[in-house]
Image (cartoon, helix red, strand yellow):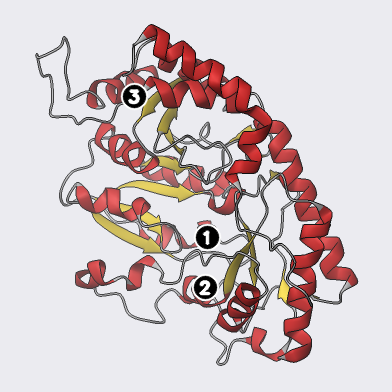
Amino acid sequence: MSAGAGVPLLDLKAQHATIRDEIREALDRVLEEQHFILGPEVEAFERELAAYCQCAHGVGVSSGSDALLVALMALRIRPGDEVIVPSYTFFATAGAVARLGARPVFVDIEPVTYNLDPARLEALITPRTRAIIVVHLYGQMVEMDPVLEVARRHGIKVVEDAAQAIGAEYKGRRAGSLGDLGCFSFFPSKNLGAAGDGGMVTTNDAALADRVKLLRNHGYRPKYYNKEVGGNFRLDAIQAAMLRVKLRHLDAWTQARQKNAATYLRLLAEAGLLIDVPACGRDGCRAAPCSLETTPGVVFPTALPDRRHTYNYFVIRAGKRDALQAHLKQQRVGTEIYYPVPLHLQECFAELEYRAGDLPASECAAKTTLALPIYPELTEAMLAQVVRAIREFGTSG
């Protein structure tokens, strides 16, 4: 096949072209006001984002990573505490725990959604467990009811890492509104992306919101009078102004991502490339070699019926994942591996003494998953080009 113009993993220029005038107007407003750190623009965005997430409070912060850190600080997580986190996620989820001297306790995922498996929580809770961080990975929310039930029964807090899931829903409730605190990232590749770093902490607890506000600004109250040791976790007004513009378009962009996902499903099915999810079950994928190796097809991401999947990433499974990625690169199709090494096997956590095989579903996902382009501005012709490249790999491999 001719690779044509290629299909990038993400094209932010295409998005910017549709809102250029709105963005310039917002930036000009901030430049005229000359109020760059916190202030009215940030406060307006906090109100708008909180309302979008069905939350009473939003607190703008400097990044999604800092949102996790300050959320745990607000919950008074300290050295010696334990926080349960999924192993198959971006590093910041566990990194925030470790930065406070607490111990991340890794939990395996369920293989269909790649999210934390609620059935595995109970066995990991000890007298030192202070919180659970759930990660709504790739744009689909965790099964929250059993998580919240376990947390309530044991008197521990729940933090939602919703960095990839703004606007996602579980039984009609938005990401960031179910736990004690929700954490969002506005990294440029996110569905709602800034021109740099930015983040938000959401909550329905006024006291927690006030505490996050205190901690994001060095613990000042008033200025230069420190109630606590906080940090510089402030959101700047330029990012807030841009994000306010983009928030108005977010639902339309989400609908376009969902349409692209449906188109992928149709095209992959027509090409005979869809296969069932591997039979990992609650015990994870222990097959050797992986059962995916026996077929040239791919596993399509599953949107569960009680969820609103926002497709921050469109992640397939393939047994010969690395060879497929190399083939797609040759055909000028952009891809990314999220994430090649589960956190329990990362070198920086070696002292926790996890071993290969401890969390098999996470390890299987790390070996077989691959993200394809899903951004809103993709055309059906571009999606068809991706599918043709996958089909060619199947017939040649």
The image shows residue 232 at horizontal and vertical percentages of: 22, 30
Task: Report how far apart the C-alphas of labels 3 and 2 lie in the structure.
Answer: 34 Å
| Amino acid beneath label 1 | Asp
The quarter of the picture where residue 341 lies is: bottom left
Q: Which tag, 3 or 1, sits closer to the chain's start? A: 1
- Number of other residues with Cα within 10 Å of mark 1, as a class: few under 14, some 14 to 19, many 20 or more: many
Q: In this picture, is 37 found above or below 345?
A: above
Q: Which tag, 3 or 2, sits closer to the chain's start? A: 3
- On the image, numbered disc 3 is attached to which residue? 208
The N terminus lies in which quarter of the figure?
A: bottom right
Determine the secondary structure under disc 2: helix
- On the image, numbered disc 2 is attached to which residue? 361
Q: In this picture, is 93 found above or below 74?
A: below
Task: Report how far apart the C-alphas of labels 1 and 2 lie in the structure.
Answer: 10 Å
Residue 117 is labelled as 1
The image shows residue 260 at horizontal and vertical percentages of: 77, 51
Task: Report how far apart the C-alphas of labels 3 and 1 lie in the structure.
Answer: 27 Å
Q: Is residue 337 visible?
A: yes
Q: Farthest residue in the left direction?
A: 225
The image shows residue 181 at horizontal and vertical percentages of: 41, 33
Say left or right for 16 vs 98. Answer: right
Determine the secondary structure under disc 3: helix
Number of labels in the image equals 3
| Amino acid beneath label 2 | Ala
Q: In this picture, is 168 found above or below 275?
A: above
Q: Are marks 1 and 2 in contact (CB under 8 Å)?
A: yes
| Amino acid beneath label 3 | Leu
Say left or right for 74 vs 351. Answer: right
Say left or right for 51 vs 267. Answer: left
